[in-house]
Amino acid sequence: MAFPALPTAFQRLLAGAALAAALLPAAHAQSPVLDKIRDTGTITLGYRESALPFSFGDDKGQPAGYAVDLCLRVADAARQQLGLKDLKVRWLPLTPQNRVPAVVNGLVDLDCAPNTNTLERQKQVAFSVSHYVSTVRMLVRADSGIKSFEDLRGKTVVTSAGSTGDRHVRRLKGEYGFRDVYAKDHGESFLLLETGRAQAFVMDDVLLAGLRAKSKDPSQFVIVGPALSVEQNALMLSKADPAFKQLVDQTLARTFASPDAVALQKRWFQQPIGTRGTNLALAPSAEVINAWKHPSDAVTE
């Protein structure tokens, strides 16, 4: 099946990669990840347990979410490329703190989450083309009176260790005079805010919206403050396997160029999720739509 029309620059990228692959005996023979998948009949995917709507455990404890769905499409593309009748998917829960080591050490073939593509992380891992775009802000209680970082002096700010919120909290601590604490994951970070042990939670605004939406009373929390950074969210994989990255990027680009992109957006960002009916009610921003129209793994920091 022919791929839908893609932006010119990306077409050239794929064409060049395809030409290089054509000069090799077999595309998957040059990919350690695809070789392992072929030999074991299994692909191992990382996910988060509390990064709704991108990656989380559903009502039955099974991996679900927007990034999880994208990874399942990659798994099926790998199955087809390798000529496998069946492919077993093995899921491994990861945290923001251990995700990079898990990819570097080959514990997972692909990490299915809202991983922010940064120059620092690129020293260790590779990223797919961006699958979503968000900003880093902060979540506070609606009655807290906190509207900016100036209001945080003497207060406690939490974020998840190893996240992009982590680097902003460390950077701003001295300037604004707040205390900083670091939770193991997003669920624990929100719990510290919810129970009053922290007065602000700094993180990706989409993740904050997801945590707020599934809380006991979403009206008690608001997202405030300036955008600290624009986050290019992507799947994360080994930087030692360009052939596997090519497969991942082609699969995502094909998805974004089809009606599936809008369908996935509606399912995970604009409709009730799970038995509790959690609904983020978030329409795709202009930045998200542009990321779909012009697939890229460029960093915007």
Image (spheres, grey):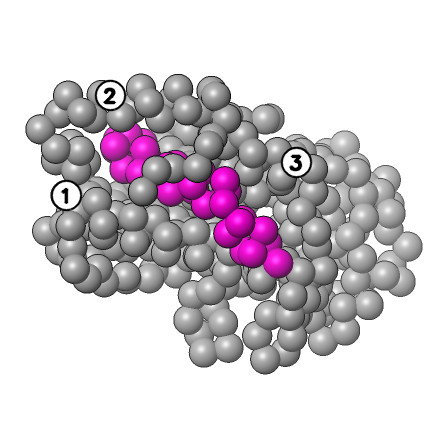
Range of the magenta residues?
A: 239-266
Tags 1 and 3 touching, CB below 8 Å: no
Against 158, is 18 above or below?
Answer: above
Against 34, is 188 above or below?
Answer: below
Give the image location of residue 252, x and y in percent: 43, 42
Task: Tell me which amino acid carries mark 2.
Answer: Leu
8 left or right, relative to 194: left
User: Marks 1 and 2, how far apart in space?
Assistant: 20 Å
Give the image location of residue 21, x and y in percent: 20, 26
Q: Quadrant of the C terminus?
A: top right
Residue that carries the numbered disc 2 in the rendered image: 19
- Judged from the image, the secondary structure of the residue bearing numbered disc 3 is helix
Task: Tell me which amino acid carries mark 3.
Answer: Glu
Q: Earlier in the sequence, mark 1 or mark 2?
A: 2
User: Marks 1 and 3, how far apart in space?
Assistant: 36 Å
Tags 1 and 2 touching, CB below 8 Å: no
Residue that carries the numbered disc 1 in the rendered image: 35
Report the residue at 61% width, 33% height from top.
Answer: 290
Tag shown at residue 287: 3
